């Protein structure tokens, strides 16, 4: 597998699962000791003064920023990384030259536990080296370029941290959209074409043409939907936005995950990826075609 990290970063991987599995294996103690020895030898050879956490992760912040901001659960982190074996063989990296960091919601189990823990120890803008034992990395998975039970090294830069409101602000600015209305739920409504019909009322059936996107512009759905207002037949942010429009009106609705798919997102088990990630704010281009 050529791009090991790129593939596995899409898989949920829980610390608890990894630790329980490792602790139950008869050779775990020796494997853990071997990993510890390899990590300490690597750190000494590279002149790294590392600290060890209670989970077994070794880390050192190599370049401190002036920021004091630390990531909170559900916030989006942008991360540049290089992941290597301890012998220096490079396994994968982000696109530094194209300035395309890896972006994901922190604390949702979408990345390997060693990386997520390491990011929790960093401030926005910090650079760090993480030396990760196998049970916080790829565990017993065996790849052509990485044997099972191997420790790995991450060279990581925590480029940015953004909460959902900041993500929405950036989306609106990038697309030159000016919000018409903001509601207490965090919904932003941008009217793009005036309507001439009435505003629908609770209990009416509305017909809506829509295109749904993540805020990175990836389209996840398109079509026409009919549903009754006030019957929880659609996600809350979508229904709230439609209830503010007139028939014939077009708008862009942007709203945070608490009124979308929340901390669970939508996971496609057949494809082993999220159609909608956890803690994802969403954008919908909509047209209210009818209400009856």
Image (cartoon, rainbow, N blue to C red):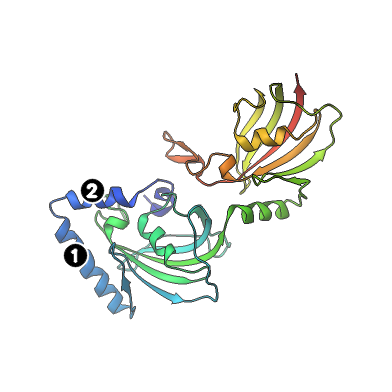
The residue that disc 2 covers is 21
Left of 26 or right of it: where is 217?
A: right
Which of the pair 208/185 is nearer the observer? 185
Q: Is residue 248 above or below residue 36?
A: above
State the image quarter where residue 33 is shown: bottom left
Q: Residue furthest top?
A: 292
Looking at the rendered structure, the secondary structure element under dot 2 is helix
Residue 93 lies, in percent from the top left, at 45, 60
Q: Which mark is residue 34?
A: 1
Find residue 225 and report its horizontal and vertical position in percent: 66, 25
Where in the figure is residue 220, as x and y percent of width and height?
58, 37
Of the numbered discs 1 and 2, the one sitting upstream in the chain is 2
Name the quadrant containing residue 251.
Answer: top right
- Please indicate, yes or no, whether residue 194 appears anywhere in the rendered image: yes
**Regarding mark 1 in the picture, which secondary structure is present there?**
helix
Cα distance between the residues tagged 1 and 2 = 18 Å
């Amino acid at each position: 597998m050529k791009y090991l990290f790129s593939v596995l970063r899409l898989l949920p991987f829980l610390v608890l699962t990894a630790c329980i599995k490792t602790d139950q294996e008869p050779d775990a103690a020796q494997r853990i000791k071997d990993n510890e020895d390899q990590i300490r030898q690597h750190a000494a050879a590279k002149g790294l003064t590392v600290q060890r956490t209670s989970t077994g992760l070794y880390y050192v912040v190599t370049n401190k920023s002036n920021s004091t901001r630390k990531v909170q659960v559900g916030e989006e982190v942008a991360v540049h990384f290089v992941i290597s074996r301890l012998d220096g063989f490079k396994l994968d990296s982000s696109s530094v030259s194209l300035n395309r960091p890896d972006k994901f919601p922190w604390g949702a189990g979408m990345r390997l536990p060693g990386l997520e823990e390491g990011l929790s120890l960093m401030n926005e803008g910090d650079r760090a080296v993480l030396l990760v034992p196998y049970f916080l990395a790829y565990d017993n998975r065996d790849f052509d370029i990485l044997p099972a039970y191997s420790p790995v090294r991450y060279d990581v830069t925590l480029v940015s941290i953004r909460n959902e409101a900041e993500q929405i602000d950036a989306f609106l600015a990038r697309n030159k959209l000016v919000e018409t209305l903001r509601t207490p739920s965090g919904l932003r409504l941008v009217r793009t074409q005036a309507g001439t019909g009435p505003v629908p009322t609770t209990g009416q059936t509305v017909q809506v043409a829509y295109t749904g996107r993540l805020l990175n512009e990836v389209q996840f759905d398109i079509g026409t939907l009919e549903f009754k207002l006030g019957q929880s037949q659609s996600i809350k942010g979508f229904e709230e936005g439609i209830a503010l429009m007139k028939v014939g009106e077009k708008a862009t609705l942007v709203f945070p995950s608490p009124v979308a798919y929340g901390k669970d997102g939508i996971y496609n088990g057949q494809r082993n990826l999220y159609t909608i990630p956890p803690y994802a704010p969403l954008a919908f281009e909509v047209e209210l075609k009818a209400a009856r």
